[in-house]
């Protein structure tokens, strides 16, 4: 008995090993009731595990579905028909002065409209650029357009360096893009389809991002 007392802490570290040891020890001493107790404990453990598993499955079934925003294609207020992006608008290439906005027509395109001095724009840019990289192999192209409004080209160049922009970056130097497609707030994301029709995401909350991803998955399968 002294041997058992000394080594019990060691066996207690191992749940099943300890139970088997107790059965063996008590059987040597003629205590067959321990076998029944052991079986009862094992049965209780199994029942408990089944209850926990059933509860987990129940909670999983009632877990709320991810929220997805109801965003429609942008419409022309004059005709109530889907608006088409005008790629002839003049934008100044900042990352590459020789690049033209028209180079990005007739393809799935994600546009990030921003101000380099806007904290929200700074916060969301890495997320959007990573999203573009994620879908690039499936045919998505991405660009960023900095607004005018007193913003200098050097401000945008600094933004490019600071936030490691690898997508082409323009500036709306003539203030033609923002008034035509903007909301007055920044940042704004546009998902342009091959035919030029587009979705506008005025905020980058979870529901809007879920819609953006779902739409990307849909249009890039075509």
Image (tube, grey):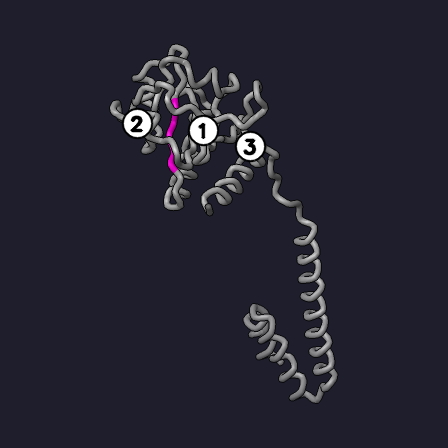
219 up-or-down from 161: above or below: below
Q: Which residue is mark 2?
A: 161
Q: Is residue 169 magenta?
A: no
What element does badge 2 sit on?
A: helix
Q: Compare residues 173 and 160 and report the one nearer the observer.
A: 173
Sequence-wise, which precedes: disc 1 or disc 2?
Answer: 1
- Give the image quarter of residue 52: bottom right
Q: Which residue is mark 1?
A: 123
The magenta span reads 141-145
Q: Which residue is mark 3?
A: 205
- Give the image quarter of residue 136: top left
- Would residue 31 be found to the left or right of residue 71 on screen? right
- Would residue 194 be found to the left or right of residue 40 on screen? left
Residue 45, label in figure: none
Dot 3 and dot 1 residues touching (CB under 8 Å) = no
Spatial CA distance of label 3 from label 1 is 12 Å
């Amino acid at each position: 008995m002294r041997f058992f007392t000394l080594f019990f802490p060691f066996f207690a570290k191992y749940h099943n090993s300890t139970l088997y040891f107790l059965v063996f020890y008590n059987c040597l001493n003629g205590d067959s009731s321990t076998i029944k107790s052991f079986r009862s404990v094992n049965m209780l453990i199994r029942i408990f595990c089944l209850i926990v598993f059933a509860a987990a499955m129940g909670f999983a079934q009632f877990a709320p579905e991810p929220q997805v925003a109801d965003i429609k294609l942008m419409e022309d207020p004059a005709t109530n028909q889907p608006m088409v992006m005008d790629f002839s608008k003049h934008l100044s290439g900042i990352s590459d002065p020789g690049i033209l906005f028209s180079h990005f027509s007739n393809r799935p395109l994600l546009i990030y409209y921003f101000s380099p001095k806007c904290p929200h724009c700074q916060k969301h840019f890495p997320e959007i650029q990573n999203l573009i990289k994620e879908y690039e192999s499936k045919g998505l192209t991405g660009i960023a357009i900095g607004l005018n409004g007193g913003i200098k080209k050097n401000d945008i160049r600094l933004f490019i360096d600071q936030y490691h922009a690898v997508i082409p970056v323009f500036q709306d130097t003539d203030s033609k893009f923002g008034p035509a497609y903007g909301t007055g707030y920044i940042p704004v994301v546009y998902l342009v389809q091959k035919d030029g029709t587009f979705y506008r995401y005025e905020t980058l909350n979870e529901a809007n991002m879920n819609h953006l991803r779902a739409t990307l998955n849909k249009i890039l399968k075509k």
